[in-house]
Amino acid sequence: MTFSDFRSDTVTKPTDAMRRAMAEAEVGDDVYAEDPTVRRLEELAAERLGMEAALFVPSGTMGNQIAALLHTRHGDEVIVEENAHAFLWETGGLAWLAGLQTRTIRGRRGVLDPALVEDAIRTPDVHHPRTTLLLVENTHNFAGGTIQPIGELRRLSQAVRRQGLRVHIDGARFWNACVASGTRASEYAACADSVMFCLSKGLSAPVGSMLVSSRERIDEARRLRKVLGGGMRQAGIIAAAGIVALQTMVDRLAEDHRRARRLAEAIADRPGLALDLETVQTNIVVFRVTKAGEDAASVIAKLKAEGVLASDNARDIVRLVTHKDVGDADVDRAIAAIRKVL
């Protein structure tokens, strides 16, 4: 059986253009800063976001952890939305690697209220940790791929910067947010001191993410990448695919958003699930299983028997993600399977 794979946009295969670029890439030892293709990718990423410099890292998780180390000291406190990926799904790295205490705040579909964040910032006191960093996720994975509206993010950024905090954007699906909202990457970046975005999700590169910030911070980030074991040698082979991703794969994300919306609207009225259509803003569809006797695991197993692969976010939450390797026929198949199961 062939499957329609909606588990994640990380399952995407590199395009033919990426494979050609990888085969022909000019390379050098990147730990010695001698790989020209990596340098071109980093320059392109920085230019797109209107920031000074960028660093190619193996994963988004590493990019987030480096940013946390850049902006804080051991024992500081970081504020995150309560379902942030960096809090729930990065193996406790904020505590383990950066030695941070995490302060979680409930958002509305992943968007934080500036007033609540300001209230959470610690006052200067010998008994308190220092609150030094706000980490914002855009798009917000577990809220359903929801977007941080640029106006809201500006207000939030201004509020915390007034109190001396720095801002990092976990932009694993940063370009989905830009395309769906019509917001320029540089507008989002202006709200932050650093931005991480993934090349290996909807942009379909085989591996890698970018950390973008000031030149001084990226110089330090390069040292921290080495500490974490992220120094790569002839990395231009994979960086070449990242260049193609940024040049050719951003605008087509709108197709993924269209397909996700069509899928969500077709199943929203099923009696065995609960789906908030207002969360379907980009390429992720999440729903709660409400059918008696079923949970996410049982529904996912039944969908697999119908040739549709999905994932779970929680015991009763099913997630489907659209990407370049699922087309309209795959969406039709997923709709039919969900209607049959629920």
Image (cartoon, helix red, strand yellow):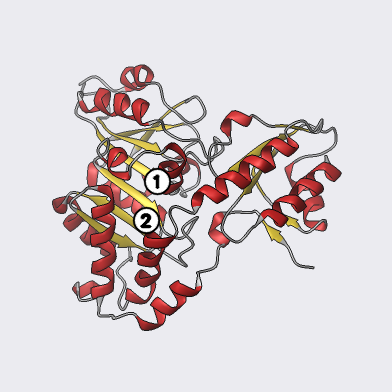
Q: Position of residue 108 (x, y in %)?
A: 50, 24
Which amino acid type corresponds to the residue marked 1 in the rendered image? Gly
SS at mark 2 in the image: helix
Residue at the left extreme, as displayed: 216
Query: How many C-alpha atoms fall within 10 Å of the one at disc 1: few (<14), some, or many (≥20)?
Result: many
Q: Nearer the viewer, residue 4 or 128?
A: 4
Q: Position of residue 129 (x, y in %)?
A: 27, 29
Q: CA distance from mark 1 to mark 2?
A: 13 Å
Residue 239 appearing in the image: yes
SS at mark 1 in the image: strand
Q: Nearer the viewer, residue 62 or 156?
A: 156
Which amino acid type corresponds to the residue marked 2 in the rendered image? Met
Question: Where is mark 1, residue-wise?
Answer: 171
Question: Where is mark 2, residue-wise?
Answer: 62
Residue occupying image coordinates x 47% and y 49%: 91
Q: Position of residue 331 (x, y in %)?
A: 70, 51
For the C terminus, the quadrant is top right
Q: Nearer the viewer, residue 217 or 330?
A: 330
Q: Report the side of 310 relative to 58 (left or right).
A: right
Residue occupying image coordinates x 21% and y 21%: 125
Figure check: 170 above or below 56 = above
Figure check: 76 above or below 229 = above
Residue occupying image coordinates x 40% and y 69%: 241
